[in-house]
Amino acid sequence: MENLTLLAPELAIAVTGLFVLLAGIFMSPQAKNMLGYLATFGILGALGLTVGSFGTEAAMFSGTLSIDALSQFFKLVFLAVALLVSVAAIKYTEDSNHTEEFYALVLFATFGMMFVASANDLIVLFCAFELASLATYALAGYEKQNARSLEAAMKYFVIGSVSAALMLFGISFVYGATGTTSIPLIAANSGLLVNNPIGLVAVVLLIAGFGFKMALVPFHMWAPDTYQGSPSVVSALLAAGSKKMGFVAAFRLFIVALIALQPDWQLAFTILAVVTMTFGNVVAVAQTSVKRMLAYSSLAQAGYIAMAFVVMTPMALTGGILYALAHAFMKAGAFIAAAAVVWMVTSEKKGNLEVPDHLDSFKGLGKRMPLAAISMTIFVFALAGIPPTAGYMAKFVLFSSTIQAGLVWLAVIAILNSALSLFYYARLVKYMYFLPPDGEKVSTPFPYAMALLLAVAGVLVIGIWPEPFMQWAMEAAKVLV
């Protein structure tokens, strides 16, 4: 008999999602705003259960699920992002007739991501991936009257389906060669893939499939349009949560299961990491839409995390895993700050309503919405790696481990890219603080303010007091090496 208490966080999220969905059917439109608070409490409960079980190690359901430090760490990442999105969405959904659908989809997406973190079998991994993906496809198109939102959802769905097909095709080759879908058994039999054309084909297909999920260039085509067209709170979930799902799955698959093929996939990740971080930062410089700029910035951040696959030392993996947590707070917070500005522009019905997140909408934001402005400043400087923020600490660990491994050239490219990113982040800060405002002062809505404060707290606490987070990340990295 399995000990289901080990899955208490997932069960808490699933039960909350079902309850929110059913309760919404019987509630009046005015009362549905309470569903946001209910979802938030459910996520907080799951977060508490996950923290309480940290350090537990167990295999469940014939070894198809693994409860270990790596899965627990990434569950914390997913739940932290879901909490920020849930709090911010209380304001976003206040006039919606489909509030229960929004929160149910957020919770089910989080449920799928948490199972991806624990998956120790390729079939379970794929099914959990698709559960999370299907929910986020619907969330991207949540604004049914908004052509940009529908376009974002369609592009995300079509390219996501292609990536799923490539991933499944790669899994089939691995199964054909090794006779198993269990990640530990594939690792034990991975010699069957070495010097076998099937092994190389499987690696190519799996890198392409996971490359879409992680938004690595050239598999990034969906990301800028989807992040810009989706509701800002959904963009926060996609950039800060869904992308990390791709990384934790890739960590287990490539570093654990396909370690015998390391020379093949390591070269591919070296090229992908360099191209992704450079392309993301260079293209971000030309953007006038803040959400689109954050999307290309997110590509660059994915390139930094992908360095962990190249260096492969315990400290580099620790840095990559810590970066995933830091990026969750930085990127989710930045998109929520953009959501507050979009709300301001649309409620005033002035400015560029076609592109409400245009740079011009941020003019004088320091005087118009001081909390949103200072929060956005902290987030973008953290993304650039300015101390004392989470971004600085994660980059310091990752880049220094790259130098210690003798890959100085890779560290230099990453540092130069970080310097380049400071240019377009500083431009946004200039708009917020050095250009005159276009309207009167506006109070940041309470849910947005709470979400921003939580994200700022996460960014600063990890930057100022990194020891416990470093320790958790090191424990998670030990699972891989």
Image: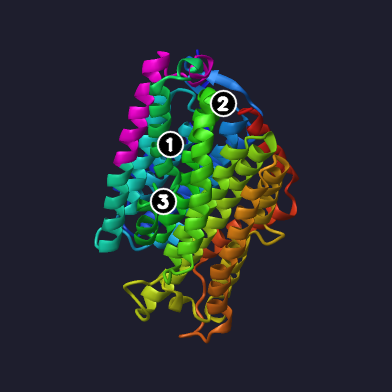
Q: Amino acid at mark 1?
A: Ile
Q: Could you tell me which residue is drawn at 39 percent across and 58 percent down?
A: 224
Please report the bounds of the magenta region as a residue range.
161-189
The residue closer to the viewer here, 340 or 469, is 469
Using the numbered discs, state the Cα–Cα distance from disc 3 to disc 1 in whole angstroms: 39 Å
Which color scheme does this rendered protein use?
Answer: rainbow
Q: Secondary structure at mark 3?
A: helix
Q: Residues within 10 Å of mark 3 (few under 14, many from 20)?
A: many
**Residue 146 appears in the picture as rendered:** no
**Badge 1: residue crowd in 10 Å (few <14, some 14–19, many ≥20):** many
Q: Is residue 404 above or below residue 55?
A: below
Residue 207 circle label:
1
Q: Nearer the viewer, residue 35 or 315?
A: 315
Q: Amino acid at mark 3?
A: Leu
Residue 167: percent from left, percent from top: 37, 32
Q: Earlier in the sequence, mark 3 or mark 1?
A: 3
196 vs 369, left or right, is left
Q: Is residue 124 left or right of residue 368?
A: left
Dot 2 or dot 3, earlier in sequence: 3
Residue 205 can be seen in this image: yes
Q: Quadrant of the C terminus?
A: top right
Q: CA distance from mark 2 to mark 3?
A: 30 Å
